[in-house]
Amino acid sequence: MRLTELFERGEFVVTAEVGPPKGINIDHLIDEVNTYLKDRVTAVNVTDNQSSVMRLGSLATCKAFKDEGIPPIFQVTCRDRNRIALQSDILSAAMLGIDNLLLLTGDHTTLGDHPQSKPVFDLDSVSLIHAVKQLESGVDLAGNELVGEPPKFAKGAVVSPCSDSVDVQLAKMEAKVKAGADYFQTQAVYEPEKFIEFMEKAKQFGVPVMLGVVIPKSVGMVKFMNANVAGIHVPDHLIEELKKDKEKTKAGITGVEITARIIKECKDYCDGLHIMALGWESKVPDILTLAGL
């Protein structure tokens, strides 16, 4: 079922993100998802060579999830494919019954494990959303008619509500809505007050927004995000909380508690939740329970 149908019914949609392995054996990933996510989240978002690190493909992993009865969200980035390949893969997803998409520009190749590779960026996130909208109307980006019934997707996009420039983020959001975005997933939020303020301004677009959270695993991790990840800022009081509770932090308890607290503070101001566990899928059930979901 498309996420848009759930939003239209007024449901609070909960998704989680996983990364495919760097190889062809996904038995462990399937086990993790079945154990910790399948009965607790609506769908599982499969990353597309996240952080420009080469891995098993998102589309193939989505098909494996679907075969296991796990609703997938096909994450598509513009970094590695031109418009022909992107449209072809998106049509392939529809043929396989995968109808939830998250459409991204993608990180530059210099950030990943093949820094010498050439990035494509034939399209960006806005023009990719437009391309999917065109396919849904029965024609490709070149205006050629598709054969048979056109596909129909829930077209997701991302926004960074805690970015330094809220006006820039609102302008990007507006461009994505005009291109055809059906829902938004946010970059990780650690400042609920900024998120709530952003959501008041984002109401004007009338599209569902899912709060994005990343479990803070350690002081080192949050300092790395502050220095290297655009749109994320972990405030000093959270860093001190992690520092003071070193033993609990090693077990992941403090990060789980912080994440649940952020969700509880923000959930009344959004339409859903997206958890980026970054390998800590086992913590997701505890987070949802502590957050009252």
Image (cartoon, rainbow, N blue to C red):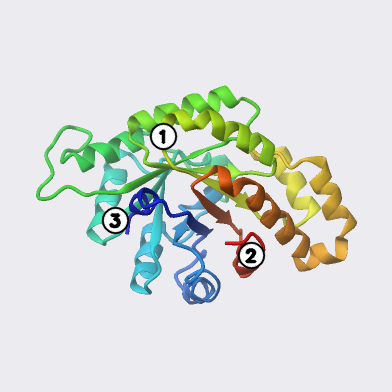
Query: In the figure, is residue 93 to the left or right of 36?
Result: left
State the residue position of label 1: 206
Instruction: Tell me if label 3 and label 2 are in contact, CB under 8 Å.
Output: no
| SS for callout 3 | helix
Q: How many residues crowd around disc 1 within 10 Å: few (fewer than 14), some, or many (20 or more)?
A: few
Query: In the figure, is residue 269 to the left or right of 234?
Result: left
Pair 1/2: label in front? 1
Residue 90 — which label? none
| SS for callout 1 | loop
Residue closest to the eye, 70 or 105: 70
| SS for callout 2 | loop
Q: CA distance from mark 1 to mark 2?
A: 33 Å
Residue 234: where, in percent of width, then height? Answer: 74, 42
For image coordinates 22% across by 41% down, the residue present is: 135
Residue type for callout 3: Ala
State the residue position of label 2: 280
State the residue position of label 3: 93
Check the picture and name the quadrant holding the N terminus: bottom left
Q: CA distance from mark 3 to mark 1?
A: 27 Å
The answer to which quarter of the image holds residue 254 is bottom right
Can the viewer see residue 33?
Answer: yes
